[in-house]
Image: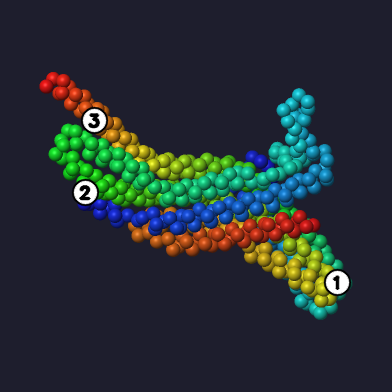
Amino acid sequence: MLFLFLALLTACSTASDYQKPITAFSQATDGAKQALAALDERLAEQLQALRRAEAVASPNRVRFPDDECATSTAGCTLLLYPESGDAKPRPLTYTTAVPNQIQVMHEVSLYAKGLQDITTADATPGIKAGFDSAMAAATSLASILQPQFAPAVSALSVPVTQAAVWLFGEYQESVKLRALRAATAAMDPILQEAVRVFAKTSEFAALEDQQILVGRFDSRMEAFENAPSEQTLAQLADAATQLDRLLAVRPDQMFEELGLAHQALTEALASDEITFAQALLHIERLATKAEELTQIAESFKAAVASQ
Amino acid sequence: MPDNKTYEEILATATAAKEGFQKRERDINAEINGIKAASSTLSAADKTRISDLREEKKALLKAIGVLGLETAEALDDTDKARNLVSALRGVRQELEARREKLLRIAEAVQKFGNTLKTISQIAEKLDGIASKLDGLTS
């Protein structure tokens, strides 16, 4: 029975098998979190500009709640009220445009860190300390109760502790793998749903920057047609390159990669013969896309700041 | 965009609007390219038509941008986005509980070891007392 138990334990994967992909996944998720934060920052700027332009065009829509902005009230919020209908008033100052999704991504990032913490958790030093105390006590007790057995108990204490630590190490690996399997399996459908929400939001959020660059390309095309020259052609070509770069980076693809990476990780952990090649491939793509996206958002931010 | 719509309703309406706008954008591009390709020199009527199309496209691009911003904000302000936070939090907390359980096993073993140590210390003291009593009675 004990032999079968040990055989089952030793057949399990070790932490070193899954530590690398899980650490990589956690790091790539942090990259995606940063990219979403950069997108959100850009989106907040654009929404604020939109709301303020609307406010300037319709000053009567700029109001505040009846129970605010007076000496007897607790605060003051300036809002842009809808022209008609039951839509909610909108803020005129944005610190974030998609607070719920920022929170969702924060949770995803904490979850990825939690997976990593599981792989690095090591209780064997505690087990060793416990067995050291227990064996020392057993030796001491033996010398009092059965002095003739004391040398034998003492001689056994080191191998028994070593065996216990080894056995616990094997047990720990199986507990870790079970925890990782359970968590990834429970998380996968939720994460896939979150990824679809992120992807759709980012797809719509990207439209504003895309339309700005399409508009710039059109106006340079018009300028070139009206006054063809090396200079106007170079300006047109430059606008085409910038637009081409922007269109090549699709924010929704980064979130799709996050979903694919997690799905591959879940499948790899669930299978008896764990191979992480597919998961690592998607994690690598996720990291690359997150970096591209952050760079694009940063370059827009810099362009706006320089204007 | 009315606020009482569900995530799916917002998405369906916005996607249909986006696809309509983007189709018109591509049609305008194709018509301008078609006029330019038809002859090497543009007539006054061609130039007017291209100018009109470009004006229409400017308004269209503006509408696409506003649609994008409004939709991104509206999709976030839905029960679906809010519910995801609590669902994710539930799984994460379960994971943390498992990790803590693993570490608690070691803690229990340590306590067991310490208990044995205490017992052996008591036994040592009792043994000492017994030896003294033996000495007194002999």
A260 relative to B45, above or below: above
- Residue occupied by mark 2: A2
- Residue occupied by mark 1: A226
- Give the label, 2 or 3, closer to the camera: 3
Estimate the spatial distance between the alpha carbons at disc 3 and disc 1, rounded to whole Å.
105 Å
**What secondary structure is found at the residue carrying circle 3?**
helix
Where residue A216 sits, quadrant-wise, is bottom right
Residue type at mark 2: give it: Leu
Q: Chain of mark 1?
A: A
Name the disc covering residue B124, or none: 3
Estimate the spatial distance between the alpha carbons at disc 2 and disc 1, rounded to whole Å.
88 Å
- Relative placement, left or right, of A11 versus A191 is left
Q: Is residue B31 in view from this perspective? A: no
- Relative placement, left or right, of B25 versus A20 is right
The answer as to whether the residues below labels 2 and 1 share one chain is yes
- Give the label, 3 or 1, closer to the camera: 3
